Image (cartoon, rainbow, N blue to C red):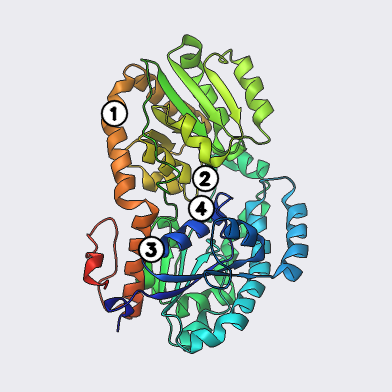
Amino acid sequence: MSALNTNRPRVLAIAEAANPEWVSVPLVGWSMAQALREVADVHLVTQVRNRDAILRAGLVEGRDFTAIDSEAVARPLWSVAEKLRMGEGKGWTTLQAINALIYPWFERMVWQQFGPAIKAGEFDVVHRITPLSPTITSPIARKVDRAGVPFVLGPLNGGVPWPKHFDAERRAEKEWLSYLRNAYKHLPGRARTLKHASAVVVGSRHTQSEIPASYQDKTVYIPENGIDPSRFNQIAQPTGDVLKACFVGRLVPYKGADMLITASAELLRSGRMTLDIIGDGPMLGQLQDQAKFLDCERGLTFHKWIPHAEVQSILSQSHILSFPSIREFGGGVVLEAMALGVVPLIVDYAGPGELVSADTGFKVPCGSREDIIAAFAETLTRLSDNPASLAPLARNAKARVDDYFLWPRKAEQILHVYDWALDERRAEKPDIFTARLRPLAATMP
């Protein structure tokens, strides 16, 4: 039977990281849970560190959400993680390894509080939204399944291999454990989690490829990031005949801002292009010195850190998002640019490569540093001859976001996954890109 035939599904949304005032994974967790409220009756379960921000956002504790206090275990282990990372923003794989030890305690506390309600049939679906990492197992998946309630997992994303030409950047990011990352596939809890999940939402084709063949029939591909139309509501209107480019991201080795400056240097010196770099990080001083050495400070502006909500004010003045990152799981900034009608120029690898098509932007192969620099320089030089020619791609990029990546659209996509899971996967698997989903009006009251 499908609860969607008569009622809005009652969903227990587990998002250990869900915070409207942060970015990255916590913002994905929050945005997904909030979007789902438009199509389902959602009770959010999150970690206590998110409580105050959620209250400020207007939710009522007890009615709309529950904050689980797992700090007795989480706080000391996070302290260890920060020491092992050897620098802010570094050691992502190490961080996930520590989280694999921390998270199960949180989920056990969730079961202690909500297990009786789940077994009593008070929820139609249990959906674990975050963690996004496919390395984090679920201690309660089997219990939820045995209670006869569909357990939906995801979106899962992460673990993209480091490109072979960028081992120096890998070491600079303190990614020592990434050499052993594939060991997670042999963790005993992983197979059990996948076995008892009714549906597994995967945020990238790479993550989908790492799901064992015996569980591939459960996977549904839905990229993890979405766009909040209230946060990104401007339309790019760059003026003048000079190509205006923008970079948005942390100033760390794998984001490639140094490659972008080298690729842009001649155009900046000649006044044929301007470049705004939005972001901060340990490479800021090095990048400023690089620009001075290359004599390309003209037309190059370092904005450092600005609030996420204000990024669109600068980005919307650009023709192009120039983003040579070589290892992005999701690529949220790419969608943000497209939502504004800013054309992306990216490296064709992992998340961004899946979001950008030939009619919405430009992709260069993920080769060596020299290859990427040369390809970016060639593309930017060609575009600088006629920036106005980007207008059709800009319209297509915005239309693609409007069609598939606004959070209300993504809530509809997840609702189809719930419908499929509640029907015990007897219906055709939802496919948001290659086939039209049936109208939601057919299943909603």
Look at the numbered disc 1 and give the secondary structure of its residue.
Answer: helix
The residue at 68%/27% (across/down) is 285
- Mark 1 is surrounded, within 10 Å at the Cα level, by few (under 14), some (14 to 19) or many (20 or more) other residues, namely some
Identify the residue at the far top of this view. 270
Q: Which residue is mark 3?
A: 38
In the image, what residue type sits under mark 4?
Answer: Val
* Residue picked out by circle 4: 160
Tell me the element at label 2: loop
Quadrant, the N terminus: bottom left
Q: Which mark, by number, is residue 327?
A: 2
Q: Amino acid at mark 2?
A: Arg
State the CA–CA distance, disc 1 to disc 4. 32 Å
Residue at the spot of label 1: 391
Give the crowd class for mark 3: few <14, some 14-19, many >=20 residues within 10 Å.
Answer: few
Q: Residue 243's spot in the image, x, y percent?
A: 40, 20
- Please, what secondary structure does the residue beneath circle 3 have? loop
Count residues near mark 2 (Cα–Cα under 10 Å), then give few for <14, some for 14-19, many for 20+: many
Q: Amino acid at mark 1?
A: Ala
Residue 377 in view here? no
For image coordinates 43% across by 83% down, the residue present is 149
Say whether disc 1 or disc 4 marks the residue closer to the N-terminus: 4
| CA distance for labels 3 and 4 | 32 Å
